């Protein structure tokens, strides 16, 4: 497999175990992603935890309209929010799971996954016990 | 200054799909109906506010309505377009700038879910490209967590939709006019878990116009008037969870609906217990459930009993979405908030026909919610 390009720069760190990059405001609150433009100067980039818990979830059963640019034919996918304790709750794709597996509060782990043939995106997957 | 502002005329173009008639022409239809209802002429209107999200500017309607030189302000405020027009028209009269004003909203959307453009919302393109920027997802994510925290069942989600379609059968401006039974609703294809296709409203077409007047004018005309006790329009506070949110604050926060609701009740000098009929934003079944609590009509979790007992049915202790709401009427964005106010005007005047709330309702409450996290509440009194 050729190397996939991130769907956008600056979303996660370039390291063996990548982490999402959030932005810490002066008041300590963390947001994701780091904003573009002048607002970028108002936050300090911070690498976020790779582990969190499922805050909520749903299925995406129909193909979104533009600018959605996922692979064809459309495959339904899981979406959720994962709470990174003490940091921020991030919206994310959920992989390696089905709707039946989803339980709010379950442990989740960060992953960088293929989005299509050329691009990667971020996701979380249920943490598997060894 | 005018202390009291009234609705003296209300017009609506049926919601749904009207091939061959533009959104703006539907707006003209609604304005002419509202003028007729109020018993005034277009030339009597001294100020006009209106708009649409996807069907063009409102002020062009003067071509059909008449070139009277009326000041006409276009409102382009997304899901709050109608609520903003109403707020502005009411305030113009309250400020003493005029005695008769128009608020109009109309729209005509393509079929299928709304497709928002990330840059319009200050969001990066990848957020839309990866399929995270959907209003339907937001409502599903919000109700999924709410159900887990507050013990709301899937059956109750189905009962919300069943009620909407039942009320829609009684309403001549509704789009969906056939009942749908609970099993069909619960077993329909899943759109965004836990919400099936019958639990979501669809983008649609339609128009609503309201003629507002000062107390002085109401007395002069002898109008069949309904008083606007309050209007409150608020955007999101810190830490809230809203549509199109790539992240949420771990500390939680307030909600624009709670803030708008509280302000509207304070301005009207009444509380939720005084309301006789309510129209609450029901983009999907879960939204009506959550908005019952956010607007102060029940505690979180009590909705389960409300629906088991039928308390929000037309004959119940607080009828909610008596015209079938967005679920039965569809959602033409620019007109949707004004439809709620239209329906309360109909109910308070006792003109609801088969869907009339019994026992002379005195207080009507309406609530609209939309992207990117805003709420408008209007309270009418008879």
Image (cartoon, coloured by chain):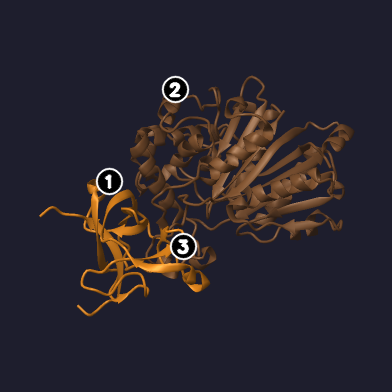
Chain colours: A orange, B brown
Query: In x, y percent, where is residue B244?
Result: 46, 57
| Label 2 chain ID | B
Residue in view at x 23 percent, y 51 percent = A107
Give the Cα separation between the discs numbered 2 and 3. Answer: 50 Å
Residue B263 visible to the viewer: yes
Residue at numbered disc 3: A26
Q: Is B59 on the left-hand or right-hand side of B98?
A: left
**Foreground label between 3 and 1:** 3
- For the residue pair B274 and B312, the one nearer the viewer reads as B274
| Label 1 chain ID | A
Q: Which mark is residue B9?
A: none
**Foreground label between 1 and 2:** 1
Residue at numbered disc 1: A105
Q: Residues within 10 Å of mark 1 (few under 14, many from 20)?
A: few
Name which of mark 3 and mark 1 comes first in the sequence.
3
Query: In x, y percent, where is residue B101?
Result: 79, 47
Residue at numbered disc 2: B309
Outermost residue, left side: A130
Residue in view at x 50 percent, y 73 percent = A37
Outermost residue, top side: B359
Q: Are marks 2 and 3 in contact (CB under 8 Å)?
A: no
| Label 3 chain ID | A
């Amino acid at each position: 497999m050729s190397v996939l390009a991130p769907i956008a720069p600056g979303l996660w760190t370039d390291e063996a175990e990548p982490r999402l990059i959030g932005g810490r405001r002066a008041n300590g609150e963390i947001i994701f992603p780091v904003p573009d433009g002048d607002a970028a100067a108002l936050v300090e980039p911070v690498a976020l935890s790779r582990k969190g818990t499922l805050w909520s979830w749903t299925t995406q059963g129909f193909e979104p309209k533009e600018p959605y640019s996922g692979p064809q034919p459309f495959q339904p996918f899981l979406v959720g929010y994962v709470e990174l304790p003490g940091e921020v709750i991030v919206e994310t794709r959920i992989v390696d799971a089905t709707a039946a597996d989803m339980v709010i509060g379950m442990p989740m782990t960060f992953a960088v996954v293929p989005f299509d043939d050329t691009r990667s995106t971020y996701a979380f997957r249920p943490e598997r016990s060894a | 200054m005018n202390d009291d502002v009234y609705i003296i005329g209300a017009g609506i173009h049926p919601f749904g799909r009207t091939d061959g008639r533009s959104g703006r022409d539907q707006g003209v239809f609604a304005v002419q109906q509202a003028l007729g209802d109020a018993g005034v002429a277009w030339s009597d209107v001294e100020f006009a506010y209106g708009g649409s999200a996807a069907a063009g500017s409102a002020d062009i309607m003067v071509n059909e309505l008449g070139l009277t030189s009326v000041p006409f302000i276009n409102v382009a405020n997304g899901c709050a377009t109608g609520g903003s027009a109403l707020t502005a028209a009411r305030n113009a009269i309250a400020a003493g700038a005029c005695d008769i004003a128009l608020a109009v909203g109309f729209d005509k959307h393509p079929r299928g879910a709304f497709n928002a453009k990330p840059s319009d919302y200050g969001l990066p393109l990848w957020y839309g490209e990866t399929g995270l920027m959907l209003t339907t997802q937001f409502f599903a994510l919000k109700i999924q967590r709410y159900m887990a925290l507050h013990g709301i069942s899937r059956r109750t989600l189905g009962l919300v939709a069943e009620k909407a379609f039942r009320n829609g059968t009684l309403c001549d401006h509704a789009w969906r006019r056939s009942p749908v039974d609970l099993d069909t609703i619960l077993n329909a294809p899943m759109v965004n878990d836990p919400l099936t296709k019958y639990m979501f409203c669809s983008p649609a077409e339609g128009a609503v116009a309201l003629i507002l007047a000062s107390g002085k004018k109401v007395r002069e005309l002898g109008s069949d008037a309904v008083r606007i006790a309050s209007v409150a329009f608020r955007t999101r506070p810190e830490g809230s969870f809203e549509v199109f949110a790539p992240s949420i604050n771990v500390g939680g926060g307030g909600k624009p609906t709670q803030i708008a609701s509280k302000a509207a009740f304070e301005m009207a000098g009444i509380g939720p217990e005084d309301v006789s009929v309510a129209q609450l934003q029901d983009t999907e079944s879960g939204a009506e459930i959550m908005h019952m609590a956010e607007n102060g009509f029940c505690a979180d979790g009590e909705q389960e009993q409300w629906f088991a007992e039928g308390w929000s049915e037309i004959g119940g202790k607080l009828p909610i979405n008596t015209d079938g709401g967005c679920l039965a009427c569809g959602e033409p964005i620019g007109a949707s908030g004004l439809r709620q106010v239209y329906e309360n005007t109909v109910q308070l005047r006792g003109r609801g026909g088969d869907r009339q709330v019994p026992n002379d309702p005195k207080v009507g409450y309406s609530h609209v919610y939309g992207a990117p996290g805003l709420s408008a509440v209007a309270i009418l009194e008879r």
